[in-house]
Structures are given as structure tokens and as C-alpha cells.
Image (spheres, rainbow, N blue to C red):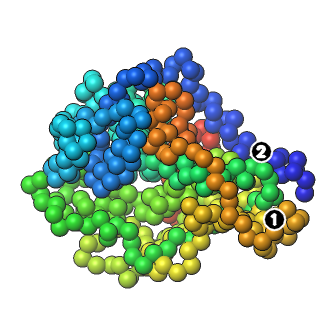
Amino acid sequence: MTSKTTRRNLLKIAGSTAAVYAAPFSVSAATRRRSVGANDRIRIGVIGSGDRGRNAHMKGLYKHVKETNFEVVAIADPWRLAREQANDMVKEWFGRDAKQFVSYRQLLELKEIDAVTIASCDVHHTTHLEAAAKAGMHAYCEKPLAVELPDLIRAVDAVKAAGTVVQIGTQVRSLPSMVGARDLFRTGIFGNLSRVEECRNSERPYWYGYLKDTVKEEDVDWKEFLHGLPRRPFRSDIYSGWYGHYEFSRGPIPNLGAHYIDLVHFITGATFPTSCVCLGTSSPTWKDEHNFTNPTSIQATWVYPGDFLVSSSNNLANSAGRIRKIYGDKGSLDFSSWSKPTYDCEGAPRRDGSIRGKNEVTPTEHPDHYLNWLQCMRSGETPNASIDAGYQHAVAVIMAMKSYERGRKTLYDPVKRKITYA
């Protein structure tokens, strides 16, 4: 197969939905919110100051404080201890207290804030992002961007209308190793794509690592935490272990798999799957007094334009057999290690000698995810994990979970922005 044919195949993968996707969401430069001035200090509010908000967002941003000139000025979280721990960091870094709030609504009323980070429960990402966009604030929003399609559409439309700079927290695509993998794939060296697979396995469900016995009812605004979900008595293992409860998250396909699906899109240029099937269950190994409701063994398979399959298999009761790989008819890309992807031609039916042995992917330099967002707020450029990229990964994982819920194959129409059932 010639390189010309390969490029045509790549265009088939990416282009069949890209054109129709662009139309509903296009934003002209004239409507983009004015970027932060080159010499102005960026003032940031933190929505969700738990483990992710503090140890990923705040620390990840602070690495770049000298070169980007920002400060954290406000914190919102339903848990008093989380707010206080985040404020301790602010005092150490900036020499003064941050304004502290129970609700994100109070934080968004502050006129002095330019941007927010969002590290709330998965089910609340879209609510917080939509509200931030309507307040005219830039945002860094955790993945998965959404767990329900109507919420996703409202949030994306609000961001597009506001013209704010939004970075979605699929930070792996900003690693030089992954940018290098994308650049290598674009050369056509792997030929026609047939399958992408992930087996992401562990000895126990990841949500057990978040359980805390320090969460007391008197320290939590339980109503704010539930935020519209059905009322129920306070439980510390729901508050700290919400990753394991289907109401707040949807388990490993959206929460962990958002990174994987986003990388498939980033590397191959694919945008939306056309269909998906997903099955899952809960292993008896991890049925206990916590009554977690997310599946611990689950597999989703998507079909993409260009006639290739993408699968994600997750076993949270045995860690053996982990792999993440892209298969073409001239070679394969192994990105089981995000930091050191490799490629070879083993098993490829049309290998032509352009790949010999096992090789490490050459990295392509790229700003890290937090720095990229800070830079784009000043330049007005589109960040690496744009709202469009977030929309794409969210559609894929929502299709999977709707298939899991209904036991039926899901289909996606990118023109109507609608998921249906076969």
C-alpha cells in the first residue's frame, strides 16, 4: 500500500464526521472572550479541592507560577477539611488566605476571577463548566467531560457561546511521548488500521484508594455534595468513595477510559464512533459492606469510520494481562506505557521493511497540560485538549454506558447530536 493510500485512509477515519461536527460549534475569533493581558495576573478559583483538585490541579499549576503570573484567590468545596487544606497551600504559596465557599455558585459570583479549575464528581462536571462559561470564566475541567449527553450538549454550547478557553483534563495527550506517537502515526507507517485495544486491569477497584475515615457529617454540606441527586442519609464512604458509585461516576470506562479514548482520537485523528456495545458485571471479590454500584469487570467495543474497532476491557479484580495497542497492516504501536510507547511490525500482513525490530517512539516537545492552558488564556489560542476533544471522548464513553444500561447497541448521529439504539 502506498503512502498516498494510507493518507487517504487516515482522512477517511477523521473526515467523515469532522465536517458535520464543526458546523454546530464553530466560533469566530471575534466572539472569543478577550484573553488575559500579557502583564495581568491570572486569578484562579478552585471548584473541588479534594485530592484531585489539590494534588493534581493546584500543584500542577503551581509549577508554572513564576513564568505565567497567576494566583489562586478562591476555593469552593462541600467539605470543610478539603477547603482548609487547599487554603493552607494558598497561604504557603501566596502569603494570604483564599476566599472559601461551600458552593461553586458563590465562587462564580466573584467578579475578580478570570478562570476556574473543576475537580468535582464526574456527574457534576458539566453543571460546573456550564455555569463557569456563563460567568465568562476560562476553565480547566476534569475528565470525563460528561456522563449524560443532554448535559454535555448544554455545557459545550455554553462554552462555545462564551468563547472561553477550556482545557479538558485528558493530560496524557500533552506528554511529549504521546505527541510523538501522533506524529509517527501521521506518517502512515502503520498502514490501514484494523483494531485498537486496551486491557486496563488492577487487583482492586481504584475507588478503595479514596476512602477516608476523616469525613464527618458535621463538616460536609451534604445537600451541596448531592447537588440534585436523590436525598439519602449521610455516608462517609459515599462522600470519599464516590468513584465507586454509579450515580456520581460511571466506573472505569468513562473515568479511566476517557484517557484511552481521547488518545485514540488524538493519535489516529478519529472523532466519533458510529456504534458501540458494552457489557459488564461486578466481581464477587469486591462485594462488601460499602455496596459500591459500579461494575468491576466491563468491556466496551466501538466501531469507527474507516472500519476499525476500538475496545476497552477493564478487570478490577486481577491485574494480569494489561496492554494498550494500535494495530495496522504494516505495523503496531504499543502505548501500554504512556511515557515510553514503542512500535514494531510483528504480525503485520503487509509489513514492507520500513519498521525493523522494536523501536521507541521519538518524543515531540510540548508544553505540559497545565502550562498549555495558562499560555492559551493569554494568547487566545485553542488548548491541546479543547472543548471539541472533550465532546468527542464524552460521546464515546456515554455511548458505552448507555449500551451497558440498556443491554443494546448504541448509534451516534453527529449531525443531530443524538444517541439511538439499534
- Counting from the top left corner in percent of width and height, residue 337 is at 57, 66
**Quarter of the rendering containing residue 207:** bottom left
Q: Residue furthest left?
A: 218
Which residue is depicted at the point 16% across and 61% down? 215
Q: Nearer the viewer, residue 297 or 94?
A: 94
Q: Nearer the viewer, residue 234 or 94?
A: 94
Between the C-alphas of marks 1 and 2, the distance is 23 Å
Which residue is depicted at the point 48% across and 78% down? 319
Point out the image quarter for the N terminus: bottom right
Q: Amino acid at mark 2?
A: Leu
Q: Nearer the viewer, mark 1 or mark 2?
A: 1
How crowded is the residue under tag 1: few (<14 C-alpha within 10 Å), some, or many (20+)? some
Answer with left or right where residue 302 lies relative to residue 3.
Answer: left
Answer with left or right where residue 292 lies relative to residue 250.
Answer: left
Q: Which mark is residue 355?
A: 1
Which residue is depicted at the point 55% across and 41% down? 384
What secondary structure is marked by label 1?
loop
Q: Nearer the viewer, residue 239 or 152?
A: 239
Q: Residue furthest front?
A: 66
- Counting from the top left corner in percent of width and height, residue 313 is at 55, 70
- Counting from the top left corner in percent of width and height, residue 44 is at 32, 34
Q: Amino acid at mark 1?
A: Ile
What secondary structure is marked by label 2?
helix
Q: Residue furthest bottom?
A: 285
Residue 40 appears in the picture as rendered: yes
Point out the image quarter for the C terminus: bottom right
In the rendered image, the vertical position of residue 244 relative to residue 3, given as above or below: below
In the rendered image, the vertical position of residue 163 relative to residue 264, given as above or below: above
Q: Which mark is residue 11?
A: 2
Answer with left or right where residue 157 lies relative to residue 22.
Answer: left
Work out whether mark 1 precedes mark 2 in sequence or the reverse, and give the earlier one: 2
